[in-house]
């Protein structure tokens, strides 16, 4: 369903360098899932990078992945708000007011990304 997310752990064996977190995002309720990965889970800051889109089944799937590609375990799931489309509207509104309102110019440096 649109706005659902799942954070999963994709693992092969203990201490395997291929083990990683995967974040699956359901953007529109029908397309493949937007997918993000984090290979270095030991750091305080988790940095996710874009990965190829995944099938929708991964929103709820836990278990063995075919083709000897390890296992997947769901850690968390829930809802998210995609603010990227809203940011485009905010940017357009700021363009209109930029020449009139000094405060709008100061707000240009503030960006909220998904």
Image (cartoon, helix red, strand yellow):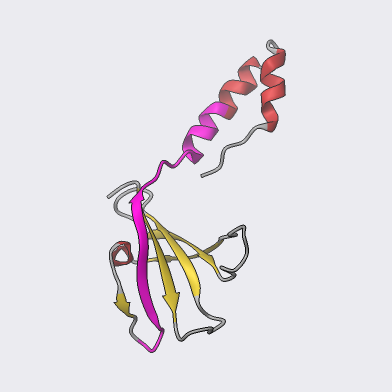
Tell me where residue 107 appears, x and y as whole percent: 67, 25
**Up-down: is 108 above or below 65?**
above
Q: The magenta stretch spans which residues?
A: 67-90
Q: Residue furthest bottom?
A: 68
**Up-down: is 52 above or below 105?**
below
Left or right side of 79 for 53: right
Residue at 44% across / 42% down in the picture?
82
**In this view of the protein, which residue sits in the foreground, 91 or 14?**
14
Tell me where residue 75 appears, x and y as whole percent: 38, 64
Left or right side of 84 for 95: right
Residue at 43% across / 70% down in the picture?
9
**Up-down: is 58 above or below 96?**
below
Q: Residue furthest top?
A: 100
Q: Dividing the picture into quarters, in which one does residue 61 lie?
A: bottom left
Q: Is residue 82 magenta?
A: yes
**Up-down: is 39 above or below 31?**
below
**In this view of the protein, which residue sits in the foreground, 5 or 87?**
5
Tell me where residue 4 appears, x and y as whole percent: 33, 51
Q: Is residue 3 magenta?
A: no
Tell me where residue 114 appears, x and y as whole percent: 51, 44
């Amino acid at each position: 369903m649109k706005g659902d997310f799942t954070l999963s752990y994709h693992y092969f064996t203990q201490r395997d360098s291929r083990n990683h977190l995967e974040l699956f995002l359901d953007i529109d309720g029908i397309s493949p899932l937007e997918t993000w990965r984090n290979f270095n889970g030991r750091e305080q800051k988790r940095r996710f990078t874009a990965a190829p889109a995944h099938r929708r089944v991964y929103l709820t799937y836990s278990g063995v992945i075919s083709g000897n590609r390890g296992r997947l375990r769901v850690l968390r799931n829930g809802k998210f708000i995609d603010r990227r489309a809203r940011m485009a509207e905010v940017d357009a509104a700021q363009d209109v007011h930029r020449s009139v309102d000094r405060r709008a110019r100061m707000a240009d440096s503030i960006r909220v990304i998904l």
